[in-house]
Amino acid sequence: MAAHFGRRLRKGAATTAVAAAAVAALSASQAPGAAGEEHGRQTAAGAAAPAPDTDGNATGNSPYYTDLPPLNSPSPSPSSSAGPSGPVTRAEGGIPATVLDAYKKAEADLRTAKPGCNLPWQLLAAIGNVESGQARGGQVDAGGTTLRRILGPQLDGNGFALIADTDGGAYDGNSAYDQAIGPMQFIPSTWAWAGRDGNGDGKKDPNNVYDAALAAGHYLCRNGWDLSHEADLHRAILSYNNSQDYLDLVLNWMEYYRKGTHSIPDGTGGVPEHRSDTDSGLPMSPLPTHPTTTEPTPKPDRPSRPGKPGKDDGKGGHGNGGQGNGGNGNGNGNGGHETPDPKPPTPPVPPTPPPSNTDLVDHLEDAGTGKLTAMAGDAFTERISARAETKVGKSVAKVRLRFTITGGTDATFTGGETVATVATDAKGVALAPALQAGEKTGDFKVTVSVVGRPAKGVDYTASVTARAADTLARTSDTPLTCAPGGEFADQVQVKATYLGTVADKVAATATLVKSAADATENDKGPYFKDADGKPVRTLTTLKTDDKGLLTLPKLYADDTAGTFLLRITTTGGATLTVGLKVAPAESPSAPSPNPTTPSPTGSASS
């Protein structure tokens, strides 16, 4: 999970030494590495520098499985199939069939949705192994849903990140604190925006390996990262769990799977044996339970301590032998009475940690955002800017704000995501990534909230308008003429522009009108033909191509001669009227009559 959630506690020296040596050996040969069920996890040693531009973290930096890939080939041995003796061994590198299918399907989906990311399914397999042991050895049903929930520890700040409940216990069953959930170990607050429907059942279920694998793929492909580049690959993995040990382990497992793997039956995979919290030598965190009330155990009565014999000189000595006042003296006898135990020292109360910057935020304010509007397919020129403030209006720096797009359009942030998380600067201002309009027109909303705190947020309304053109022009100046009952030799072609640039995919209408002043449809003269060959004089489903060109269908003429008008209009108000002439073809000039031809003899015939 997120880098800021804390550094992992150091592992036990012996285990770490062995693991480090193995990781070093595998890393030297470019082999990769690592993965978590209902278990306690503690933050690990070797936390890396924060990954830049992370969006809320996937796992909350929960613990993970530290088992290293075997040094032998991942190809199955001749006797690798599961048999009566039990499941196949992990050393064989097999991945349960449904889990493997989910990884490969996610890769294929991302190849279409985000081709520039270059996500390999082996990366998903490596993370799935490190996080949950491939869904606990493939313990999933036919649809890919885990047979029982896989939960991390409650993130109560006790050796882990402190993340108060964000889902009302809907996913993790814990209404006090969040817990990582499912085969890819998403925390509920991250799943809320990163979740995907990977199996097409209309639900986004973190316990379903298809949904979780696709969500993990999109999570790793955000921020425009190209995972074929080492730097982006490392950033993506560290944003999943910010630990250098985790990065090394995932890379080793990824390389191991790249050398070859094979499918095994669901439920027959082994489960890793070592985790980053148990390897540390520290006790595992208990699972969240409902508190129980127990009566304190009463202490047994203590026996009376024998008193010391007292001294009495008849005048009043001090008697400690259980006697009271001796003579006229004052006796301080304690015999027969229990001597009270000394009161145990009160442990010091640890100082209350100062509030974090996030704790100081009372509300968010707009920081000067202008009008948010763009044509379909265009980038918004205005960017959303929000400021975090205390109750008295003081700006708060270094606070993570989450920008979430909702609504009926397909607008996104740059990179194709609908959620982005940005930290406020020294002036308390966070500038969201640029908005990108899709093809669906209409209004949508961008909600800005504080990550990890229910402070008052701020909403923005943005609009996507239809593509428009402000100018239309013919691409040819050839006169458009035709004989009655014939067809025009040339098709009408126009080019649309908007503010001097190509206006592509702009809707247009072409109508043969009665006159320049009367835009109603003419009932005579030139016409187009529909699919059945019948005359039509209005076309309404036209659209310019990617070069802004619009070529109309062929025109025909009825028997009416004259000059006619074709009017083309587009979204945005561009209009062009084109003249059409229907007239009979001109006949060639008749030759002049011959003069009287003289006779061969030079005299007229009689």
Image (spheres, rainbow, N blue to C red):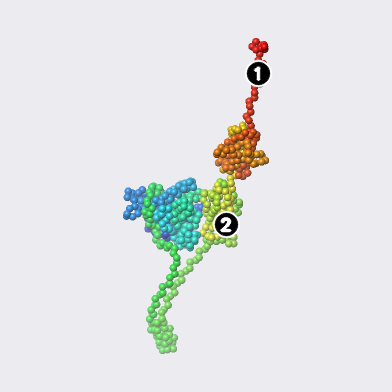
In the image, farthest residue toward the top: 601
Percent of width and height locating residue 382: 59, 50
Q: Residue at x 37, y 51 (%)?
A: 264
Residue 596 vertical placement versus 197 (above, below): above
Asked if the residue under mark 2 is in contact with the one under mark 1, i.e. CB atoms within 8 Å, the reply is no
For the residue pair 241 and 563, the one nearer the viewer reads as: 563
Q: Residue at x 56, y 41 (%)?
A: 545
Percent of width and height locating residue 539: 59, 41
The local crowd at label 2, few if under 14, some if 14 to 19, many if 20 or more residues have their Cα within 10 Å, is some
Badge 2 is on which residue? 458
Confirm whether residue 256 shows in the render.
no
For the residue pair 1 and 88, the one nearer the viewer reads as: 88
For the residue pair 546 and 160, the one nearer the viewer reads as: 546
Residue 162 vertical placement versus 597 (above, below): below
Percent of width and height locating residue 195: 48, 54
* Alpha carbon separation for disc pair 1 and 2: 97 Å
Confirm whether residue 291 shows in the render.
yes
Give the foreground label among 1 and 2: 1
Badge 1 is on which residue? 594
The three-letter amino acid code for the residue at tag 2 is: Val
For the residue pair 124 and 9, the one nearer the viewer reads as: 124
Percent of width and height locating residue 588: 63, 25
| Secondary-structure class at tag 2 | strand
Residue 338 vertical placement versus 150 (above, below): below
State the mark number for residue 56.
none
The three-letter amino acid code for the residue at tag 1 is: Asn
The local crowd at label 1, few if under 14, some if 14 to 19, many if 20 or more residues have their Cα within 10 Å, is few
In the image, farthest residue toward the front: 606
